[in-house]
Amino acid sequence: MPGPRYAELIETAGRYKGLAAENYSRIRELAETLRSRFCDYLGSDMPPCVRLVPPGGPFEPKDYGDSAFSIPAKGFQPLGPVSFGLAVRVTDSGDWLRAALTCRKEGDKFIVRVEGGPRYEFDLPLDGQETLAFLEILHAHVMNWFKLSIEEYEHGQYGQREIGFDFFRAA
């Protein structure tokens, strides 16, 4: 029979593991919702136009499944923020831009921060209007990056600003 300290450790670790799985599941659901709704929001006639990809490192515009997230889907997961990437098709020829997002729980809200950009608070369960508001912010962030880069180039000051995007260039 285990001693009381060991029993307490097992019980506490079990609670931690359950909450980490809940955290991952909620963030994964949010990521999947953002992926599918952003493609709908953009109104592209060339699906897929948004993919879930890893938040950093090299990537291709393909479905990464569990590997799109910064923590493993199975096993003993850390209880903390989870990151993932949204790759968005930005040209008809197959060029993609990746925005890295990090989600974390604060009270009854999930905070989503776009690397180098805005943050947004979601209540769970997700509400269609709330998701739409975030997608408008994300679209404006992407558009702003392109517009500012164009403006800086036209004024001879390009290459001095980074806001967290990576590109996949079509062959």
Image (cartoon, helix red, strand yellow):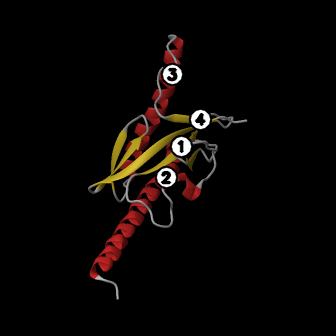
Q: Amino acid at mark 1?
A: Gly
Dot placed on the residue nearer the N-terminal end, 1 or 3 = 1
Can you tell which of label 1 and label 4 is closer to the viewer?
1
**Residue 78 shown left or right of residue 38 in the figure:** left
Horizontal placement of 132 versus 62: left or right? left
What amino acid does circle 4 point to? Phe
User: Label 2 amino acid?
Assistant: Ser
- Where residue 161 appears, as percent x and y from the top left, is 46, 23
Regarding mark 1 in the picture, which secondary structure is present there? loop
Ranked by sequence position, the earlier of labels 1 and 2 is 1
Can you identify the residue that label 1 sits on?
56
Check the image and report above or below for 21 versus 27: below
Categorize mark 3 by other alpha carbons within 10 Å: few (<14), some (14-19), many (20+).
some
Q: Earlier in the sequence, mark 3 or mark 2?
A: 2
Q: CA distance from mark 2 to mark 4?
A: 19 Å
Image coords of residue 158 (percent x, y): 52, 17
Element assignment for label 2 = loop
Frontmost of labels 1 and 3 is: 1
Q: Write down the residue under mark 3.
A: 149
Label 1 crowd bin: few (<14), some (14–19), many (20+), radius 10 Å: some
Gap in angstroms between the C-alphas marked 3 and 2: 29 Å
Q: Residue at x 67, y 37 (%)?
A: 94
Please report the residue visible at 49 percent of the width from the left and 49 percent of the height from the top.
Answer: 84
Q: Which residue is mark 2?
A: 70
Q: Which residue is mark 4?
A: 167
Whole-percent x, y for residue 83 in the image: 46, 49
Percent across and percent down for residue 73 are: 50, 62
Q: Earlier in the sequence, mark 2 or mark 4?
A: 2
Q: Residue at x 49, y 44 (%)?
A: 41
